[in-house]
Image (cartoon, coloured by chain):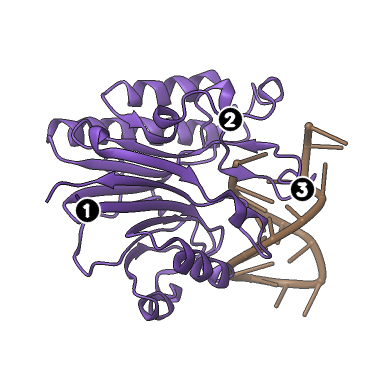
Chain colours: A purple, B brown
DNA sequence: ATGCCGTGGAAACCACGA
């Protein structure tokens, strides 16, 4: 049975990060990759550099901030949407969805939400609500679906190096953790936590205070698998060493492996 | 433990991130 490897990586600037991104892609050889925080306008995406190492891409760029992309070794990427439904006034590039290798891939960059409370936190909760509504539609469609990316949520205390100092933060406040739990309860499987129920696993380490050296990390990049895909999940992990490279993003790449019959 | 660092863009500082 063939294995498919899918990864997510918040690059924090796709052009500034290009050497690191290319090095990691050649090392890890994922079949499908979700990128967040491109921080590049639509016309400045490094399409050719990625094609040169065998990755086709669709992306939704934006000047300065946000921006999401889906890469695939197979040419067959069919874009389904590039906004989350529910708010025509939302200008942030935070969602792109495509049909790739028989799987619906939703690549997302959920708002940070700080400072909380405040308008940014309200935007985060509203975005979460729209995501949850769309996720319910995807579950009902009975398709193999992955909702992948930077959720900006630590779901439990096991996902934070020092939970007591994060209780008021927009990434860990009860409203946000409840929203994540409510989403998962639709029937989604949190891949990393399901395969590693007890382990402290982080996907992000701040640039300052030697956070990576102290392993003062957060688990905020997640894979949610629809019911049809959950039994196919075989492996999940974090390429933590990439965070230690020169000119690294503050996130590390996260990946899963699925066994697909056919 | 308060953006202390890092990125991008516009104008040599500012917004934003988590």
Nearer-N-terminus badge (3/2): 2
Give the left or right position of residue A233, taking residue A156 as reference.
Answer: left
SS for callout 2? loop
Could you classify mark 3 by the number of other residues whose Cα lies within 10 Å: few (under 14), some (14-19), or many (20 or more)?
few
- Label 3 resides on the chain identified as A
Residue drawn at point x = 66 percent, y = 23 percent: A163
- Report, in whole angstroms, how far the alpha carbon at label 1 lies from the one at label 2: 30 Å
Residue A162 is labelled as: none
Compared to residue A135, the image places residue A43 above or below, namely below
Residue drawn at point x = 12 percent, y = 36 percent: A141
Residue drawn at point x = 16 percent, y = 52 percent: A102
Nearer-N-terminus badge (1/3): 1
SS for callout 3? loop
Which residue is denoted by mark 1 in the rendering? A2
Question: Residue A219 at x, y = what percent?
Answer: 55, 36
**Among the 4 quarters of the image, the one containing residue A33:** bottom left
Question: Residue A189 at x, y = what percent?
Answer: 32, 29
Whether tag 1 and tag 3 are in contact, CB under 8 A, the answer is no
Which residue is denoted by mark 2 in the rendering? A200
């Amino acid at each position: 049975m063939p294995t498919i490897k899918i990864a997510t990586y918040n690059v924090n600037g796709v052009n500034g990060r290009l050497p690191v991104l290319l090095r990691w892609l050649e090392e890890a050889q994922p079949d499908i990759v979700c990128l967040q925080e491109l921080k590049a306008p639509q016309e400045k995406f490094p399409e050719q550099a990625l094609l040169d190492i065998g990755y086709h891409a669709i992306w939704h760029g934006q000047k300065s901030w946000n921006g999401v992309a889906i890469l695939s070794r197979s040419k067959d990427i069919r874009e389904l949407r590039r906004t989350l439904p529910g708010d025509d006034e939302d200008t942030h590039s935070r969602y792109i969805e495509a049909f790739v290798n028989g799987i619906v891939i939703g690549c997302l960059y959920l708002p940070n939400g700080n400072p909380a409370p405040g308008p940014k936190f309200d935007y985060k909760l509203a975005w979460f609500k729209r995501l949850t509504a769309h996720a319910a539609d995807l579950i009902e469609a009975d398709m193999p679906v992955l909702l992948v990316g930077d959720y900006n949520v630590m779901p439990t205390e096991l996902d934070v190096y020092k939970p007591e100092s994060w209780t008021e933060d927009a990434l860990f406040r009860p409203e946000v953790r409840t929203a994540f739990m409510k989403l998962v309860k639709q029937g989604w499987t949190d891949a990393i936590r399901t395969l590693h129920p007890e382990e402290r696993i982080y996907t992000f380490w701040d640039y300052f205070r030697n956070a990576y050296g102290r392993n003062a990390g957060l688990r905020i990049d997640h894979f949610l698998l629809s019911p049809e895909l959950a039994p196919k999940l075989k492996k999940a992990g974090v390429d933590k060493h990439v965070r230690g490279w020169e000119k690294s993003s503050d996130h590390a790449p996260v990946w899963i492996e699925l066994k697909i019959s056919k």
